[in-house]
């Protein structure tokens, strides 16, 4: 029994890949680069700022909708969108969902910026489109959740298991930190 256990441990150790090995092997470099770029674009999409300052955005926008209710609406849309994305991913394809998601996120952030421009410079126009900040954040949550949010994590499957094993601790720690940030922002 001990011999078989030692054999499995030796195979597992031999299967791991060093960082230098990952960077020098072309079959791993391209998929790792794709995953890295997707994770980078997920990070710079602004999701953390939107989630953490959701309440303050609604307060500053002067909307007639309660900031608490608006935050609940945005969170609900995000959950529903993730469920919809799960069913659409295999039918439509990840690439199309990712491109659609990026377009929706860009449009929604543009609309949010436009609404705050009107709040600062044209109070008459901002009073006519007081619903725009809520609409743009709901659109952002839906757009993020159908593509930019889940797809980079799914693309990790294109990496060999030796690479994923090397990076799994980073993935776990990033997930824990993100959940901690969400819970802390909810309590503030």
Image (cartoon, rainbow, N blue to C red):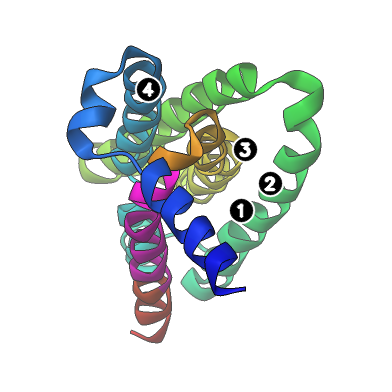
**Marks 4 and 3, how far apart in space?**
27 Å
Say the numbered circle drawn on residue 28: 4
> In front: 66, or 37?
37
Rendered residue at 38%/44% (across/down)? 14
Highlighted magenta segment, given as a residue range:
164-179
Q: CA distance from mark 1 to mark 4?
A: 33 Å
Query: CB atoms at circles 2 and 3 under 8 Å apart?
Result: yes
Q: Is residue 135 above or below residue 182?
A: above
Of the residues tagged 4 and 3, which is closer to the observer? 4
Was residue 94 drawn as part of the magenta stretch in this picture? no
Could you say where residue 92 lies in the image, as x and y percent from the top left? 76, 20
Characterize the local packing of mark 4: few (<14), some (14-19) or many (20 or more) Cα atoms within 10 angstroms. some
Whether residue 113 is visible here, answered yes or no, is yes
Disc marking residue 146: 3
Determine crowd level at label 2: few under 14, some 14-19, many 20+ residues with C-alpha closer than 10 A: some
Q: CA distance from mark 1 to mark 2?
A: 5 Å
Question: Which residue is the site of mark 1?
Answer: 78
């Amino acid at each position: 029994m001990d011999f078989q256990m030692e054999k499995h441990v030796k195979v597992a150790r031999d299967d791991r890949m060093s960082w230098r090995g990952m960077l020098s092997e072309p079959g791993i470099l391209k998929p790792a680069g794709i995953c890295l770029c997707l994770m980078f674009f997920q990070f710079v999409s602004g999701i953390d700022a939107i989630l953490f300052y959701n309440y303050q955005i609604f307060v500053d926008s002067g909307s007639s909708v309660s900031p608490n209710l608006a935050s609940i609406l945005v969170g609900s849309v995000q959950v529903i969108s993730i469920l919809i994305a799960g069913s659409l991913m295999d039918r439509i394809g990840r690439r199309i969902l990712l491109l659609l998601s990026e377009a929706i996120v860009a449009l929604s952030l543009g609309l949010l910026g436009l609404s705050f421009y009107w709040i600062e410079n044209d109070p008459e126009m901002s009073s006519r489109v007081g619903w725009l900040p809520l609409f743009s954040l709901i659109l952002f949550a839906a757009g993020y959740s159908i593509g930019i949010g889940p797809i980079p994590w799914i693309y990790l499957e294109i990496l060999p298991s030796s690479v994923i094993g090397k990076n799994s601790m980073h993935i776990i720690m990033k997930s824990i930190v993100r959940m901690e940030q969400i819970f802390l922002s909810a309590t503030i």
